[in-house]
């Protein structure tokens, strides 16, 4: 006896594609594929097109390695940006987060990852060389290490600072402490330790 | 002072597209879009292509309304299928679920929805007319209503059975009861009530 065991092939293929995305299980992938089928034709085409266009047009800025659809990103070419200071982050999303704070007006450098021996990511796999080239070219006076305050972010910041210091550059690290608006009671020990250690005169 | 407030336009557009999918919030949409950017070119093209192909090739079977990439689906054209009985479901996924049970060897009819006044879905918005046409054409002896046992599925089954009975057709409903392998203790009252009411001689 024959029983049907799958959706039509083009639908199964689409489900597989969605299931490859991070955080998407097979049930969600099915729901997404069905949603695509329920879209008007032009809308589905627009979706497919957005994938192709993003892939084609978005690349790394030739200077700071942040994502851009221009030759150089709008921060690197911004006339009002302080060009003597670079803030080093691991991810393009971190640039947006820092920009939202409206406190920083210098340049950025996006590493696209952190050094992580566990995941076979070494210093040559992230954009460290490009950072050194920028610093060596002369204009830079300070580099702020703004990788995440976890083990790998910490180790990456340490590794890079050791490369930069011999070049006579001021290397700083973003401060640790209690998040604004949060509650001392719920802060973990390491954060509290760092908050007291890093206390400043009022 | 100018601060960057968004990703490059083609990337933002892709994030928006992913965010339209059911169950995808803006953070997940970002992660998905970044994942696409990290793919090799051909893989991203394959993804885009899967969307276009599924949309172009998958449509409703002209008989049972199930999804297919053929003119008529492989169940409707299957030579070993019992052609006098139709199982009515609300969704193409339900066909696969019933096929997996390997118990049913008849035909299907996919309504693509249930009657739901709350969501402005009336009898004309789902494939009821197509079902009536099939039944009127003659061969059919029994119609099994296999919509979900919730309020809307129940009402839809009731509505359709009232249309079918005057045609001299046997109309049945899938049985309610305790799921196999589950525990009486955790069954809800309505299910237990139905399980006792529907008891059969052993």
Image: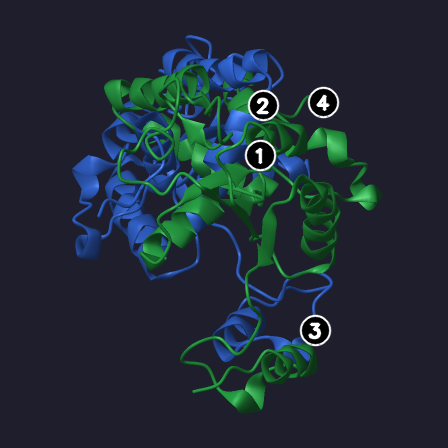
Chain colours: A blue, B green
Mark 3 residue crowding within 10 angstroms, few (<14) / some (14–19) / many (20+): few
Q: Is residue A23 visible?
A: no
Q: Which residue carries the number 2 mark?
A: A39
User: Share a chain, discs 4 and 2?
Assistant: no
The residue mark sitting in front, 4 or 2, is 2
Q: Mark 4 belongs to which subunit?
A: B
Q: Residue at x 63, y 64 (%)?
A: A200
Q: Mark 3 belongs to which subunit?
A: A
The answer for how far apart the CA atoms under marks 3 and 2 are is: 46 Å
Measuring from the top left, give residue A115's x and y in whole percent. Answer: 25, 48
Measuring from the top left, give residue A23's x and y in whole percent. Answer: 42, 49
Disc 2 element:
loop
Q: Which residue carries the number 4 mark?
A: B1
The residue mark sitting in front, 2 or 1, is 1
User: In the current view of this chain or complex, which residue is farthest to the top?
Assistant: A71
Q: Which residue carries the number 3 mark?
A: A183
> Which residue is nearer to you in this view: A66 or B58?
B58
> Which residue is nearer to you in this view: A95 or B117?
B117
Disc 1 element:
helix
């Amino acid at each position: 006896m024959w029983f049907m065991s799958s959706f039509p092939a083009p639908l199964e293929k689409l489900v597989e594609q969605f299931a490859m995305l991070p955080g998407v299980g097979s049930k969600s992938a099915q729901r997404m594929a069905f949603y695509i089928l329920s879209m008007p034709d032009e809308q589905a085409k627009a979706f497919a097109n957005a994938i192709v266009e993003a892939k084609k047009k978005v690349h790394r800025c030739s200077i700071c390695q942040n994502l851009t659809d221009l030759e150089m990103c709008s921060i690197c070419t911004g006339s009002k940006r302080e060009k003597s200071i670079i803030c080093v982050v691991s991810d393009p999303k971190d640039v947006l987060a820092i920009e939202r704070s409206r406190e920083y007006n210098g340049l950025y450098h996006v590493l696209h990852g952190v050094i992580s021996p566990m995941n076979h990511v070494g210093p040559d796999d992230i954009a460290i060389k490009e950072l050194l080239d920028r610093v060596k070219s002369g204009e830079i006076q300070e580099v702020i290490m703004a990788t995440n305050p976890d083990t790998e972010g910490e180790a990456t910041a340490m590794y890079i600072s050791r490369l930069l210091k011999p070049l006579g550059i001021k290397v700083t690290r973003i401060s640790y402490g209690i998040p604004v608006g949060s509650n001392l009671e719920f802060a973990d020990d390491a954060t509290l330790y760092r908050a007291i250690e890093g206390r400043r005169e009022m």
